[in-house]
């Protein structure tokens, strides 16, 4: 298939480009590079030995997106493009609502105009809010604590309404849990700008000596050791989940959790990183981070049942691959 990947130069997008190319699909990327670099796509080409067509465009720009659709016969779209920093979304709600909602509307509108029926959307486990774990796709969603989370919940609703009105559309809403790790080549991975918000890049940068100490946000949650519990998923498994979603997509809207089904606490992740890489990660316990929930992990059985997809990598290999990328990475 010819697949348009919006946000394809980003962290999850670039790994998905690798998975798509390796599965024999052709890839067209549309990215404005607001949180990524064009040379990531060169690395994807090096890893796969395949070509990618790249458009440096903003996908909120309807005319620019139209040009891409008129230049290619597309069979489907994976829509990753979006802003994703939770804290920043609280400070800049207009930028987040505008970018994340308008981009989705523009891309899906042009899909309809060009009769491109397969659409895969990057959603997030954040839409479950503080539900009881494990999170199941049939649960009622609870409010999220920030504009970023709301853009994902709204995006899901918009796409659900569009599929209702257009029965020919096949839409997958993929709820990612906590993506970590990197391609085993060490060439592509997560390289956040500035001080990382997320746990794994923070741990990696402490290990590298770039940051002094990890701050563990709270050890008084009702979890195995009091620290937050998350479902960390290797980004390569997540990427393969997108290929499985595209291959198995059928008419209507389908929601899938992409997680491992295993919860790991913050301290357990720190210990796993130290063991996997033989390197110490100093940390201190500080106050809870506002907006965090105690536990978030998936019931991942629907994706296994319907897509034949399960995550294969364990926490140790996530830690090894994250560290290999961080060690090699030069700004
Ligand atoms: P990322 O920032 O690495 O990638 C997003 C890409 O989209 C970047 O390359 C950026 O330049 C591009 N982009 C943003 N707005 C654009 C626009 N208007 N036009 C064109 N390109 C644009 O983020 P990621 O971690 O790869 O996340 C990909 C998607 O998955 C996002 O929608 C994100 O919200 C979602 N998601 C991520 C996580 C996570 O923890 N990483 C969890 C759940 C959901
Ligand atoms: N944490 C720390 N110290 C840090 C960073 C994080 O202790 O420096 C803790 C958090 O308190 C939390 C856990 O590590 O308990 C994971 O935090 P992250 O920031 O890595 O991830 P979140 O679960 O908060 O959120 C992430 C993405 C969201 C996405 C969500 C989906 O940032 O965009 O996963 O589950 F929606």
Image: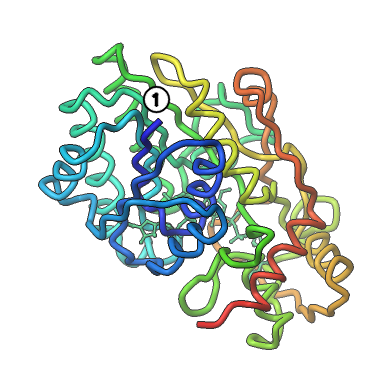
Q: Answer above or below: position of 237 versus 39.
A: above
Residue 326 x %, y %:
64, 74
Where the N terminus falls, by quadrant? top left
Residue 125 visible here: no
Badge 1: how crowded within 10 Å, few (<14), some, or many (20+)? many
**Colour scheme of the rendered structure:** rainbow
Residue 125: percent from the left, percent from the top?
A: 55, 41
Whether ligand 1 has any atom under 8 Å from the Cβ at mark 1 is answered as no
Q: Is residue 272 above or below residue 193?
A: above
Residue 161 appears in the picture as rendered: yes
Q: Residue at x 53, y 49 (%)?
A: 18
Looking at the image, which residue is at 76% across and 47% down?
Answer: 313
Judge whether 220 appears above or below 176 on screen: below
Q: Quadrant location of residue 269? A: bottom right
Left or right, residue 277 beside residue 246: right
Identify the residue at the far top of this view: 167
Q: Nearer the viewer, residue 95 or 1?
A: 1
Q: Quadrant of ligand 1?
A: bottom left
| Image point (64%, 77%), residue name | 328
Describe residue 102's horizontal placement relative to residue 63 as left or right. right
Count all numbered tags in the image, as a single digit: 1
Which image quadrant for residue 146?
bottom left
Q: Is residue 60 left or right of residue 284?
A: left
Disc 1 target residue: 171
Residue drawn at 28 percent across, 41 percent down? 104
Q: Secondary structure at mark 1?
A: strand
User: Which percent across, then down, holds residue 306?
Assistant: 61, 18
């Amino acid at each position: 298939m010819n697949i348009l990947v919006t946000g394809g130069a980003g962290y999850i997008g670039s790994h998905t480009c690798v998975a798509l190319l390796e599965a024999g699909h052709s890839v067209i990327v549309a990215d404005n590079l607001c949180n990524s670099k064009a040379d990531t796509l060169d690395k994807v080409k090096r890893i796969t030995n395949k070509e990618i067509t790249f458009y440096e465009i903003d996908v909120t720009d309807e005319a620019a997106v139209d040009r891409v659709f008129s230049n290619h016969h597309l069979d489907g779209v994976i829509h990753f493009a979006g802003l994703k920093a939770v804290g920043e979304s609280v400070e800049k709600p207009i930028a987040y609502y505008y970018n994340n909602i308008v981009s989705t509307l523009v891309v899906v509108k042009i899909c309809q105009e060009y009769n491109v029926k397969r659409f895969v959307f990057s959603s997030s486990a954040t839409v479950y809010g503080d539900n009881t774990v494990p999170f199941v796709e049939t649960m009622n969603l609870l409010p999220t604590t920030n504009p970023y989370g709301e853009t994902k919940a709204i995006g899901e609703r918009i796409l659900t309404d569009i599929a209702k009105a257009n029965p020919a559309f096949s839409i997958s809403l993929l709820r990612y849990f906590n993506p970590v790790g990197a391609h085993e080549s060490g060439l592509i991975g997560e390289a956040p700008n500035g001080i990382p918000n997320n746990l794994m890049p923070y741990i990696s940068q402490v290990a590298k000596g770039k940051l002094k100490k990890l701050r563990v946000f709270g050890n008084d949650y009702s979890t195995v050791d009091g620290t937050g519990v998350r479902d960390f998923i290797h980004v390569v498994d997540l990427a393969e989940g997108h290929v499985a979603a595209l291959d198995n997509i059928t008419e209507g809207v389908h929601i899938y959790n992409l997680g491992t089904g295993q919860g790991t606490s913050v301290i357990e992740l720190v210990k796993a990183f130290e063991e996997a890489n033989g390197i110490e990660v100093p940390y201190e316990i500080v106050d809870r981070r506002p907006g965090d929930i105690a536990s978030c992990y998936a019931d991942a059985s629907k994706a296994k049942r319907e897509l034949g997809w399960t995550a294969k990598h364990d926490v140790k290999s996530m830690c090894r691959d994250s560290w290999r990328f961080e060690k090699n990475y030069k700004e």
